[in-house]
Image (cartoon, rainbow, N blue to C red):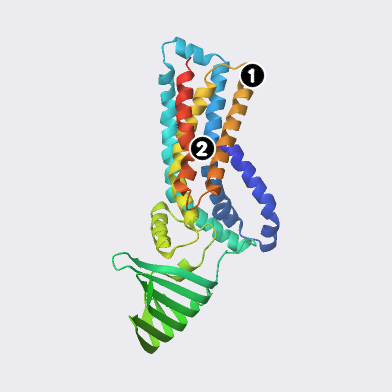
Amino acid sequence: MLFAVVVITVVVDLVEKIDYFLEKKPPLSEVIFDYYLKLILYYGNMFAPICVFLSVIFFTSQMAQRSELVAILGAGISFYRLLRPYLFVGVGLSVLSFILTGYIVPKATAERIEFEYKYTPKRKISRDRDIHKRVMVDKKAGSEVYVYMTYFDNKRNEAFGFTMSKFTHGKLSEKLTAQKAIWQDSISKWELRDVVIRKITGNTENLQKIIKTDTAFNLSPGDIFIVEQKSETMNTPELVEFIKNEEIRGSEILNDLYIQRYRRFSDPVALIILTIIGYAISSRKSRGGTALQIGLGVVISIVYIALLLAGILFVGDSFPAWIAVWIPNILFFPISLLLLRLAPK
């Protein structure tokens, strides 16, 4: 079933991109191994919970319609003992999904996106003007440091109209301005030119001018640009560290990062819950046959996805991302236990 879904996805994508491939003529090996193999891995892992759910319904309903479950139960095997191999395989696939999502798929996604940038009209989504970031927070000292850049040249790694402001207990205590800030990759520092430093202490203000100086703060050129699907190209430890830095900077993409982090844990759990539901609703013979049970499974899948998408849409300060991502699992888990309890009756 997963194979069928992946084949459809690849065919649709190929129809969309065939003109670009014919125009730019990428090597066939890159198309197969750098793009479509990575695309299959990405979508295969994404659709795995739903495909496993529908597969469980199809397989179990076939056994029920042929009275094979009746024979097994009549032989003294309990209904819940029959559930054991389903759970065993479900947990195994869940662990596999967690490993793929957290460590393997991100690297594959990064390579696939680079291929798209190279051979398709897809371009990096980024901001290069009016960049404002918080780069340091010291709660004990009550201080915060903000950086502002009027314009950033991504090719030369140069910022123009650079300003760094330090606030202590909500009041401006130091302000540094520079005409230009150049990133020095060899030492991981910024070289500031034509610098003016203002230090404010009470009613006293000290002014200092420096032609050139180096400084370091929690911001690099790679952190300035908001690149499309950036969170999906990081493994789980990298994503957690990236979120910590973005929290300090007060990033506008924090909610997207939270959703990505929580889904890496909720999707594998969903696979187990859907396995239980699939087994419970398809283990009894139905007059409508296998088609009716698969149709019921499709409806449940649609409801599950709709709940997830609806929750994500409402993510904000008053609606945490973890609730939005876990809502389907929180609602469907007690339903799975109820169905499992009622099924033998």
Crowd around label 2: few <14 · some 14–19 · many ≥20 (10 Å)? many
Seen in the picture, residue 6 relative to 278 is either above or below; the reply is below
Confirm whether residue 184 shows in the render.
no
Considering every residue shown, the one lying at the far front of the view is 203
Q: Residue at x 55, y 61 (%)?
A: 114
In-front residue for pair 246/142? 142
Q: Give coordinates of residue 37: x percent, y percent.
A: 55, 49
Amino acid under label 1?
A: Gly
Q: Residue furthest top?
A: 74
Which residue matches tag 1?
Answer: 288
Quadrant of the image containing the N terminus: top right
Q: Mark 1: give few (<14), some (14-19) or many (20+) Cα within 10 Å.
A: few
Residue 140 spot, x, y in % from top left: 28, 65
- In the displayed structure, 183 sits above or below 137; it is below
Tag shown at residue 112: none
Task: Report which quarter residue 194 is drawn in.
Answer: bottom left
Q: Amino acid at mark 2?
A: Pro
* Number of numbered discs overlaid on the protein picture: 2
Report if residue 30 is visible in the image.
yes
Of 43 and 316, which appears nearest the observer?
316
| Residue contact at pointers 2 and 1, CB within 8 angstroms | no
> What is the distance, in whole Å, between disc 2 and disc 1 at their CAs?
25 Å
Asked which secondary structure carries label 2, the reply is helix
156 above or below 224? Answer: below
Look at 42% across and 55% down and name the residue there.
Answer: 239
Residue 237, position as x, y percentages in the image: 38, 54
How far across and down, in percent of the image, does residue 7 sit? 62, 42
**Counting residues from the N terminus, which is met first, the one under dot 2 or under dot 1?**
2
